[in-house]
Amino acid sequence: MRRGVNVRWPIGGVLVVVYALFPVVWILSLSFKAGDDINNKKFLPTKWTFDNYRTVFDTDLFTAALRNSLGISLIATFLSVAIATLAAYAIARLQFRGKKLILSIALAIAMFPTVALVGPLFDMWRSIGLYDTWIGLIIPYMSFTLPLSIWVLSAFFRQIPWEMEQAAQIDGATPWQAFRKVIVPLAAPGVFTAAILTFFFAWNDFVFGISLTSTNRARPVPAALAFFTGESQFQQPTAAIAAAAVVVTVPVVVLVLLFQKKIVAGLTAGAVKG
Amino acid sequence: MTTINLDSLVKRFADGTTAVDDVTLDIDDGEFMILVGPSGCGKSTLLRMIAGLEDITSGDLRIEGEVVNDKAPRERNLAMVFQNYALYPHLSVFENIAFPLRLQKRFKDEEIRAKVNDAAQTLELTELLERKPSQLSGGQRQRVAMGRAIVREAKAFLFDEPLSNLDAKLRGQMRAEIARLQRRMGITTVYVTHDQVEAMTLGDRVAVLRKGVLQQVATPRELYQQPVNMFVAGFIGSPPMNFVPATIEGEMAELPFASVPLPAELAQGARDRNLLLAGIRPEAFEDAALVDDRDRGSGVTFHATVDVTEWLGNEQFAYVPFDASSEVRQHLRDLARELDSEAMRTQLVVSLDSATEIKEGQDAELWLDPSRMMLFDPATGENLTLARTPVAA
């Protein structure tokens, strides 16, 4: 019985990994295929080339989109985490009326289907001039990531014993100093988790990106990929799209690999008292 | 010169419970004041009111004569050691101790280093300065918490059950350490504990609290010898004072196991009461065989069956069960519940010289010093013998 389990686990693991990674490897392989090589009916390219990457980075469409994506995602992440930290602290520490209401509304927002909001937002943004701007994307990204950030962070703050702030206050700290010098550093893993999750949401978003933008001014990468054309009208841009996809996937994969321990710690925090 | 004056302090929580009820207490400069009582008596709340962590419902709190009711904790300049130490886990020991100094922003880096090193030396923490709190043992954490308190020359120290998370041996050592530190620095100290040994050994004066009401403030010796009521008498002393029913018959008090003569002045006052409770400390008894002939006459000798004995080397405890009416049992049960203990059965705990030959299950001849007996009114708990018992200097 024991031996059976020992053998089955690794085999299952390998199967799952292969199943999950196959598309990624396929895109990677595609991105290195030159010209019509994408129709070579083989998994690997017959001749490895960086042409597609060169093409991608030479296209204004892509470089502008990359700039937009980075800028929008970083700003949305920063604002969302900053606001969520303050809000979560208040929720964890203060007694005020309507606390439950705020938490339930936050949860409701998180569950709201994004597609349902795109139409009204499109209309609204058009009339108030936010259409096709960075802010026009930052606002919806923030509103959709705030609830999760608030939940993650308030779980973290709740874990930190009250005595920490009280000790700091006795030691001569103002409430703000106690928050900044003691509480935030202690909640750093939570802040981190919230930041990464927010960044992913903004970075990977397609629906808002394609609906609320129309030009290179604000269009993020996932939306831009849809507008890719080949070098000529008759050429399929598949390889170039694959290369662009690899370029936008890499930062995410690197982030996850670097911080996976922190993310897991962050997501499971509050579940068990440690 | 830091005096702390509590003037009719009241703390009422939002749910209507009164945690601290009209406590008036003057703490002198340099005095080591202990707040003691069973759990839930309001002692910690009172301390946190002094620290500024709890609002004051009514009454005045003065530090150095100035009313500080509405001042934030940091404006009161008091140092506090918490029960769970409340060290900052993300900072090294050095930074933990330096934390209050860094907040003041009037010290240069060298000054801070010198002060922290000084404090570390006092508490023998020098080797641990670079460690994180999680790498320290309980006793070491305790010392770091104290370092954080002494480094900043606060007006007074507040301790909230600082030793209750340590094992018994370490507790004894740290107790001596705290006493030494306080005496050397001569700083006003308020110390909360539920442990009456800590209260007796550390305090210049001890304030006993019961359900938020101050019962008695006195030196440990006075508290032990002249408790104002049954609650204080039962709380102070280990093993605790024995309470036995006493019926007054003329000049004699009839205890379940012996008749004890009453002093004349008390006999007068006690005559019209039929039932009293006699409080006798375990050490007021002795094995009759070991009592000097000189003393024997001044005491009462009686026979009793010893149920269980505990030999501790320096003394021996013997347990003597006795019967009591249901009324007495009820009184004792109520008292025990207030003192956080449990009245399993009515029995005497008797402390005997370790040379005693009394064994379990034997009929033993015991001796009792009646001058060390106290009488309490079972209804009010008041000590009726208070004026009589002399305080040994």
Image (tube, rainbow, N blue to C red):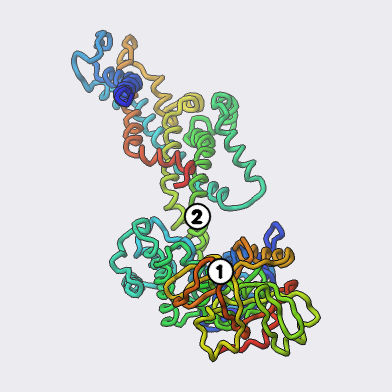
Coordinates of residue B79 in the picture (x, y in percent): 48, 71
Q: Residue at x 69, y 88 (%)?
A: B263
What residue is shown with label 2?
A161
| Residue at 50%, 34% in the rendered image | A141
Q: Is residue A243 left or right of residue A79?
A: left
SS category of the residue bearing label 2 = loop
Split into 4 quadrants, where in the image is the C terminus of chain B? bottom right
Amino acid type at mark 2:
Pro
Q: Which sits in the foreground, A13 or B197?
A: B197
On screen, A94 above or below A30?
below
State the SS at label 1.
Answer: loop
Quarter occupied by residue B258: bottom right
Q: Residues within 10 Å of mark 2 (few under 14, many from 20)?
A: few
On the image, which quarter does residue B115 sit in? bottom left
Both labels 2 and 1 in a single chain:
no
Residue B306's label in the rendered image is: 1
